[in-house]
Structure formats: C-alpha cells, structure tokens
Image (cartoon, rainbow, N blue to C red):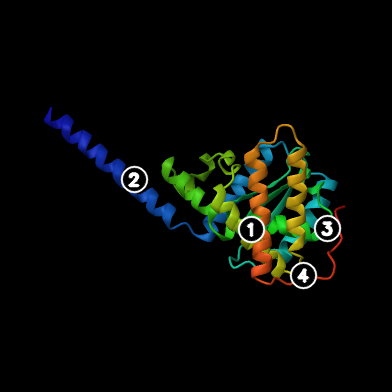
C-alpha cells in the first residue's frame, strides 16, 4: 500500500510539473510563436472551409493584402499580417486568427461600395490581433486543453470563429475606426456599412431584436468616436478595386 501511495504521489507531482511548465510556456508566448500557430490555424481554416487556390482568389487576395498592408502599417502591434479570401457568399463577415491571419468573406465583400469600407473591416480585424483578443483566447485554450505551444496542431480553428463579446467587439470597432482613419480612409464609410447591415437585419424575418439593437449601438458608438476624436474625413472615398 505504501509503495502504491508513493507512486500515485509521484505521478501527481509529475503531472503538476508538466501542467505548470505548459502554463509558463503559454504565458511566455512570443510573437514568433503566435505567428507560427496562426499559420497552422490558417491552414486548418482553409481545409475546414474547403478553400482552394485559383487565379480569381489569388487576385482578390492580392488586393486585400494591399489594402491590409496600408492599414496595418499604422497598427501599434507590428506583425506580418496576412489577408485571405473566403468566397462563400453566406459569410458576411471576417475573422481574425492569432498572429495576424485574417479571412474576409465573399458575402461581406459583396456589400461594399468603397475601399474605405474594406479598410474599416480590415481595421476591425487587425485590432482583434492588436488588442490581444486572439492571443488571449489562444492562451486560454492552451491552458484549458493542457497543450504546449509546440503542440498547437492539436487546436481546432473553430475555436476562433465566435466573436469576442460586447466589450471586445466594441473595442475593435473603436480602434479599427481610428486605425482606418489614420491610414487615410473615411470613418464615415464604417458607419454607412453598419447602416447597410442594420437595414438588412430589419428586413430579415429571422433577425432578432437583440441583433438590430446591437447594430444600432455600434453605429452610435462609431459616430461618437468620429465626432469626439474629430477624425479627419477625406473629401471622397476610394473606389473599390476588387478584381
């Protein structure tokens, strides 16, 4: 019995040490590690969503990258941001992964009327990375699943599809608006895009009162930032140059 008890205590101690080591490794996650894990997750995203390269996708991604580079150049967190295209017309949004991997849906691109609106979307997603929303979720998943950064291939990319709650999304709205404006784009474009989404929601029989209220609050917050910060508004918006 004594030998068995000692063995159990030893095993328990080893498990604690391993968990502590993994937690320390996660907490000390470097930008390089985050970028590497983000690349792994981006490859998983492409597989999960059934994305396949092709001339049109590559030309659209080249344009997304050019606009994204312009916006990201003013981001306070300097990473190598990569912008990808998901052609699914039902995907009327965008998603950011750790390390600066950002996917934009075909559905949201179909609603845009200017490059400034695209910059607002990319600014919002860039801010999820800048504000460490993506990194914090990654660290939480590593801790909860007892995975070290070296074992990140075990993570599911679906864990990053959900939003970041009211406060997280509001912060990305505010900072994304400022980031796009600093990059020379009109902050009015973001408000107009949200107004389009609100109109669509109000006309949809499946839209909930909560969803329309949330959009109304986002629009009000955007206008407040635009007026309070006295953001510069260009005399015209850049034409959308999607291939």
Query: Are circles 2 and 3 on residues that touch, CB within 8 Å?
Result: no
Q: Which mark is residue 18?
A: 2
Q: Nearer the viewer, residue 232 or 184?
A: 232
Gap in angstroms between the C-alphas marked 2 and 3? 52 Å
- Residue visible at 65% across and 53% down? 218
Please give left or right for residue 140 compared with residue 202 in the image: left
What is the C-alpha distance between the residues marked 3 and 1? Answer: 21 Å
In this rendering, position of residue 83 left or right of residue 25 = right
Q: Which badge, 4 or 3, is on the more N-terminal residue?
A: 3
List the residue tagged with mark 4. 233
Viewed as shown, does residue 61 lie left or right of 78? right
- Give the crowd class for mark 2: few <14, some 14-19, many >=20 residues within 10 Å: some
* Tags 4 and 3 touching, CB below 8 Å: no
Mark 3 highlights which residue? 114
> Is 195 situated above or below 13?
below
User: How far from the left and from the top, in percent, is residue 121?
Assistant: 71, 55
- Which of label 2 and label 4 is nearer to you? 4
Q: Which quadrant of the view contains residue 76?
A: bottom right
> Could you tell which of marks 3 and 1 lies nearer the N-terminus?
3
Residue identified by numbered label 1? 221
Dot in front, 1 or 4: 1
Instruction: Tell me the CA gap for discs 1 and 2.
Output: 45 Å
Closest to the observer, 10 or 48 = 48
**Residue 105 pos. (x, y %):** 74, 45
Could you give the CA–CA distance between mark 1 and mark 4, rounded to whole angstroms?
17 Å
Q: Taking the image as drawn, is residue 81 in sight?
A: no
Which of pointers 2 and 3 lies earlier in the amino acid sequence? 2
């Amino acid at each position: 019995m004594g030998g068995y008890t000692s063995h159990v205590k030893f095993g328990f101690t080893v498990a604690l040490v391993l968990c502590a080591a993994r937690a320390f490794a996660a907490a000390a996650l470097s930008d390089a590690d985050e970028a590497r894990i983000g690349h792994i997750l981006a490859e998983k995203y492409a597989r999960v969503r059934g994305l396949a390269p092709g001339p049109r996708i590559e030309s659209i991604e080249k344009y997304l990258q050019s606009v994204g580079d312009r916006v990201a150049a003013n981001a306070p967190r300097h990473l190598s941001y990569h912008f990808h295209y998901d052609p699914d017309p039902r995907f009327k949004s965008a998603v950011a992964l750790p390390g600066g991997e950002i996917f934009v849906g075909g559905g949201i691109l179909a609603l845009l009327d200017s490059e400034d609106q695209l910059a607002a979307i990319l600014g919002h997603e860039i801010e999820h990375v800048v504000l460490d929303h993506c990194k914090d979720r990654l660290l939480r998943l590593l801790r909860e699943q007892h995975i070290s950064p070296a074992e990140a291939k075990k993570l599911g990319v679906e864990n990053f599809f959900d939003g970041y709650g009211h406060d997280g999304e509001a912060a990305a709205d505010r900072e994304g608006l400022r980031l796009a404006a600093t990059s020379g784009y009109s902050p009015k474009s973001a408000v107009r895009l949200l107004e389009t989404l609100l109109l669509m929601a109000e006309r949809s029989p499946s839209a909930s009162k909560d969803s329309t209220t949330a959009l109304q609050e986002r629009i009000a917050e955007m206008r407040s930032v635009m007026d309070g910060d006295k953001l510069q508004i260009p005399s015209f918006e850049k034409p959308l140059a999607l291939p």
